[in-house]
């Protein structure tokens, strides 16, 4: 596959990132953290908002952190989780859309995806 932009992740990196998002619960966790903004949420509050708690939430956060999409930071007695990979998520989107309509014989203008 042709990579047109230095911001576009290599195929292996893109596959690993998409794999980390390949669970409805992980996607919901990441989406909730994106909504929370850069200050993030405590694990307890994140669990309350997503309905994912305990060892299941810990497991999902570990996979998202390993993919570089989430960071966890100890603050006193709490662990704060935050989405950190806004640029990476944009790069994944670009990875999917960069060759939109390439085989159709005309540039893709109607989908307005930048």
Image (cartoon, rainbow, N blue to C red):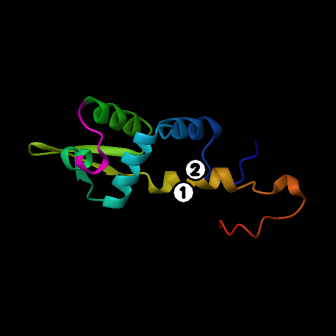
Indicate which disc residue 17 carries: none
- Residue 49: % across, % down: 27, 51
**Residue named by callout 2:** 92
Q: Quadrant of residue 56?
A: top left
On the image, the x and y values in percent for residue 3 come to 71, 48
Q: Is residue 68 visible?
A: no
User: Camera-side residue: 109 or 71?
Assistant: 109
Report, in whole angstroms, how far the alpha carbon at label 1 lies from the one at label 2. Answer: 5 Å
Label 2 near label 1: C-beta < 8 Å?
yes
Q: In this view, does 106 lie above or below 31?
A: below
Q: What element carries label 2?
A: helix
Where does the image place residue 32, in percent across and percent down from the top left? Answer: 35, 53
In the image, the segment drawn in magenta is 48-54
Disc ID at residue 90? 1
Quarter of the picture holding the N terminus:
top right
Image side of residue 13 versus residue 64, left or right:
right
Q: Quadrant of the C terminus?
A: bottom right
Seen from this angle, which residue lies furthest right?
Answer: 105
The residue located at (82%, 55%) in the rendering is 102
Seen at 45% across and 38% down, the residue is 67
**Residue toward you, 54 or 1:** 54
């Amino acid at each position: 596959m042709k990579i047109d932009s230095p911001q576009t992740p290599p195929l292996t990196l893109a596959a690993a990132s998409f794999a980390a998002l390949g669970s409805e619960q992980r996607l919901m966790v990441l989406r909730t953290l994106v909504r929370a903004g850069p200050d993030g949420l405590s694990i307890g509050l994140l669990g309350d908002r997503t309905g994912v708690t305990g060892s299941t939430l810990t497991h999902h956060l570990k996979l998202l952190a390993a993919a570089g999409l989430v960071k966890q930071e100890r603050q006193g007695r709490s662990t704060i989780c935050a989405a950190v990979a806004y640029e990476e998520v944009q790069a994944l989107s670009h990875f999917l859309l960069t060759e939109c309509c390439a085989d159709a014989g005309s540039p893709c203008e109607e989908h307005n995806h930048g």
